[in-house]
Amino acid sequence: MDSDVIVVGAGPAGSTAAREIAAAGAGVLLLDRARFPRDKPCGGGVTVRCAELLPFSIAPVVEDVVTRARLRIRDGREIERDGGRTLSYMTQRRRLDAFLVERAQERGVDFRDGQLVTDVARRPDGTFAVTTRDGTHRARVVIGADGANGVVGNRLGYDAIADGAVALEGNIRFPGGVPAEFRGRVTLNFGYLPGGYGWVFAKGDHLNVGVGGWRRVAGARLRPALRHLCRLYGLDAERIEGLRGHLLPIQQRGMTIAAQGSALVGDAAGLVDPLSGEGIYAALASGIAVAPAVRDYLAGAASTLAGYRAALERELLPETATSAALMAIFQASPAPFIWLMQHSDRFWEGACRLVRGETTYVALSHTLGRPMHALLGPTAAIGRRVNARRHPPG
Ligand SMILES: Cc1cc2nc3c(=O)[nH]c(=O)nc-3n(C[C@H](O)[C@H](O)[C@H](O)COP(=O)(O)OP(=O)(O)OC[C@H]3O[C@@H](n4cnc5c(N)ncnc54)[C@H](O)[C@@H]3O)c2cc1C
């Protein structure tokens, strides 16, 4: 056996799973097709609740600290809200992901980049053969952290993820420093794309600009929406570098994410937050959640990795389901939703507490549910119906 565990994909989900599994004493081989450091289409926003999942600080790769939000519906009046304390950190994925891999290597993970995995097969003895261009590796456990519809899920017969959002993003350089009006805050614009938003995020020497929305309806509208976003905030769309689009996968309720000796984490499991599009939080949370199940499986205390699914069912999956229900309301009519964020202190403080990890979607939907439904009225009913169609009970 080459190692106890092979993790395919070294994004936040894969490096975290590898680090946690190695910390529990197993031998881990972490493979990624890209040469690191590598970039990834992403806003690079790391909420406080996300950063706090890690047992170390990400300060060395933080390029801006966000305490405020500029919120606007289409071309309407902009409202700036102050969160009082830190809401999120701005990072570049090229630096964040390399930093997380280094923390995994410190725990003894054998990381090999430039290794495209082309095949994964479960052998008759229950072990796995993972094939790269350079050869075949064997392990008792394989973890798919290779993004939406990656090779691990595909070859081992996991369901494909058909649902989700699409986003388009790129960078505008400001070598002398980004304009002050964008620093220390997120700039968000709502209403142009169904089920999504546009953003301007400040990094050390550039602004990251992007737009995202529900895949089935937003796709063809991404480019004009991004140009419009730039115009609205006085930015030159012609100066955007590295324009890239990518899927934000959202799993169907009940989708299989673990089986005998294999599991999917992060985007490979479709764990992106449907309402906010935040995916790094779930990548880390699922990477952490899978480790105890792997430990028990390797020790012979469990015959499958079902304990991983059970761990997600306790916290993350109810959150995803509640976020999906809110998303359906938001998609049906974003304006009242954003109006509440702009004008209701209770609603804004709830959102701040959510991104800081001081509350959950489930708890918020209980405390804010009644005033929200009273204000949104018929919109909320539409949302419930839309969501019931997307996620039939059971
Ligand atoms: C435009 C956009 C903006 C976003 N902005 C944010 C944001 O601001 N904040 C946030 O929290 N989330 C954001 N997200 C979501 C976030 O980027 C993802 O949810 C997150 O990257 C998931 O991490 P992961 O480790 O599961 O997968 P990934 O980060 O996609 O990592 C997968 C890795 O697998 C490797 N891989 C794939 N196939 C193979 C193979 N066959 N062999 C070997 N290696 C392979 C890839 O090279 C890659 O390194 C955004 C997404 C998009 C598209």
Image: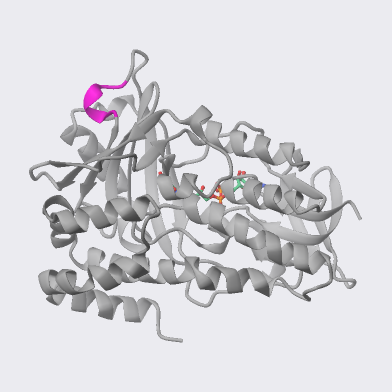
Residue 8 in picture, x, y percent from top left: 70, 51
> Which residue is at a point 62% across and 52% down the rendered structure image?
146
> Which residue is at a point 11% across and 53% down the rendered structure image?
343
The quadrant the N terminus occupies is bottom right
Quadrant of the image occupied by residue 85: top left
| For residue 296, side relative to residue 327 (left or right) | right
Q: In this view, does 120 lie above or below 366?
A: above
Q: In this view, does 28 lie above or below 335?
A: above
Residue lying furthest bottom in this view? 394
> Which residue is at a point 66% across and 38% down the rendered structure image?
103
Judge by depth and name the residue closer to the eye, 147 or 342: 342
Judge by depth and name the residue closer to the eye, 173 or 242: 173
Q: Is residue 180 magenta?
A: yes
Q: What range is drawn magenta here?
A: 178-183
| For residue 216, side relative to residue 252 (left or right) | left
Residue 221 in picture, x, y percent from top left: 28, 50
Residue 268 in picture, x, y percent from top left: 58, 59
| For residue 245, side relative to residue 332 (left or right) | right
Q: How is the image coloured?
A: one colour
